[in-house]
Amino acid sequence: MSLASVPTGGNAGPFDVSVGFVAPTSFGIEVTSDTLSGGGYLLLDPAHHQYAGVANLKLKLGQEINLTALGLLQTELPGNPDAYSLLLLITATFQPLQLGLGFTLNGLGGLLGVNRATNTDFLRGLVRGGQLDRLLFPPNVLDNPAAALALVDAAFPATEGRYVIGLLARLGWGTPASLLRLDVALLVELPAPVRLAILGVLEATLPSKDRDLLKLRADFLGTVDFGAKRVAFDATLSDSHLLAFALSGDLAFRFYQGKNPLFLVSAGGFHPAFQPPAGAGLAGLRRLTLALARGDLRVTLTSYFAVTSNTVQFGARLELYCRIAKGLHVEGYFGFDVLFAFNPFHVQAHVEAGVAIKAGSYELLSLHLSLDVTGPGPWHLWGSASFKIWFVRIHVDVDATIGSGQPEPTLPPADVRTLLVTALNGAASWEVEAPKTALPGGVVLRPVGSTAAPFFLDLRGALVLRQRVLPLGVVLSHYGRSPITPATGRRFDLTALVVGTTPYLFATDKAVETVRDFFAPDQFQQLTDAQKLSVPSFQLLPCGLRLTNLAGLVADLRTTRRVVEYEHQLLDGTSGGATRHKRSLSPAAYQQLARGGALGQEVWAARPSARAPQPVSWAEDTYVLMHAATLEVYDPVGHARFATQVEAEQYRQALVAAAPALAEEVLVVPEYQLALA
């Protein structure tokens, strides 16, 4: 009902009264009986084309079964009003069923998503927060239906063309009460690229729930992306303790192939100077922590251990707090961080310790020690020691170098030119790239018993040269752990490709494209310790070429070329017979006639459809030079954008060689950082 004031008079004196029907936006139902009890909600949002429902029922049929259901229906998707998405999650828990060896089945569930995808970043956030149980076998969705629906909607967002199928199970071990419980889900996302995910919550209480000397809770998520060739695993300890010590921390595993290859294992994070790769979901890994807080005494031990493709990192820190009198307390600490790099071998270590008696935040008596070590070649040690009593402070610094300063003996020089030429001449570096079409390819015929060619060209595809010995167009300072033979050169570029008698110049021919592959900069350039930790471990650098225009290419004498000619017969009574003349059509006339014939209908004449969707690609980070004082792009020649940090740094070094003053003024940064500055 609505009431409005009308100066000229309405249907109710000076007012206008109207009555209408407002459809409900939600329905609720509660059931109470001997066999079935519980309730549910149905939420309607026609304005946003969304409909949702939750239910929590208790079924008594010999044994008690608890059912939980969540459903989401979206009748329109952004950008496509004809599409829809559906998400169903149903779980059931019941009395344990014996499986043998002490294991029991305590619950089952299923998940179905139509036009839905798995949001691994959101699931990883639930793992880090120790909240994965809100998604797996939620205890009572009726307490907050909106929050439960928002959670599953965020975990499996609407995505046109993707489908998610999942199986959930709750397992236990131990009798009569489960000492170990595992809630686990296996998810499959279809179609190609197929993605798998296994997520769960593991809880263990030993020796019993009444005497939980050891209590562990681990949330975990493992994913396999077959399209991106990536495997990842994350786990978090939360709400755990050993005796009186609380336990917490994060674990991570990454194994990536394809673009941006990566391998690492981490328990508790990384060395403070190590920068984990961006985009791998490794930011903010928490240290493995064992903490005791009892009265006036607090003890905390944190540690970490990590392995990457080129480093081993580990460290720990022990902190102590003890209140000794009113207003007085003792603080102490001991910690160390160690990083080993293998190629080239390098050690970086830091040790610190200290103890202090404080009145509030003021130090009455203290002793602090710190030592850093790097090496070898030579070993460099520096550190400090300080002692304070009341207002008197004594501070001592130490800085020493041990060894001759010469690096360790290196391997014999490498003849990189010979290695590169051998790779270019090898058949393994050459390949024929198939055309991007669903039509079948042509057929190549050869005499029986003849020697097969290394490969046959498909004129609709491309000829690819890809060698993985060294990056092209980059100045090399060493090769692996070996120096480079000076006479062989330090930079190698491909300038032209001659196939048969046809030359292709890289600088001008549009049919020639640069091929890139992943190389580790540490293997061929001298990097500082800071650069080893900050620059990407692998970068896409030039390694070959792709020749796309193969029409008319003849590189084998066994290839046959025929000239199509028409024969004209002229009947002339004076000559006493017919005269024959061979004539060839112009290329334009021949193509016009062939378009409707057999040649025009075969696979070589196929062209991409103008209505085919445009390919989708991910733009990698580009690098630019930045002026340190102005935080603006430094580009004296214009359009100086580089695909990798290595190429940008090489350009910077060339500028510094011409103007040494630029060494401290110009930096290499990812271009996106300038937009954030």
Image (spheres, helix red, strand yellow):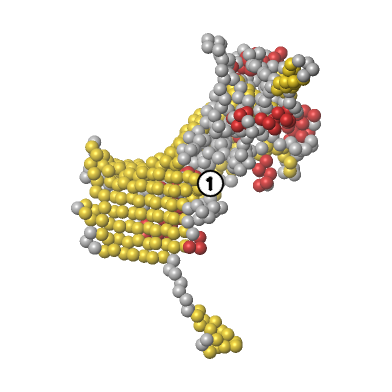
How many marks do you count on the picture? 1
Q: Residue at x 23, y 41 (%)?
A: 98
Image height of 236 relative to 493, above or below: below
* Residue 519 drawn above or below residue 252: above
Q: Position of residue 298 (x, y in %)?
A: 42, 46
Q: Residue at x 71, y 36 (%)?
A: 641
User: As drawn, which residue projects farthest toward the bottom?
Assistant: 13
Q: At label 1, which amino acid type do we have?
A: Leu
Picture quadrant where residue 525 is located: top right
Q: Is residue 326 above or below residue 644?
A: below
Q: Residues within 10 Å of mark 1 (few under 14, many from 20)?
A: some
Give me the residue at 68% from left, 31% from top: 593
Q: Is residue 362 left or right of residue 674?
A: left
Q: Is residue 109 visible?
A: yes
Residue denoted by label 1: 364
- Residue at image position (53%, 50%) is 361
Give the image location of residue 497, x and y in percent: 70, 20
The image position of residue 101, as x and y in percent, is 24, 36
| Residue 394 visible within the image | no
| Residue toward you, 651 or 3 | 3
Q: Residue 281: percent from the left, percent from the top?
A: 52, 41
Q: Secondary structure at mark 1?
A: strand
Q: Is residue 612 left or right of 43 when viewed as pictured?
A: right
Residue nearest the viewer, comparing 267 with 505: 505
Q: Is residue 289 left or right of residue 505?
A: left
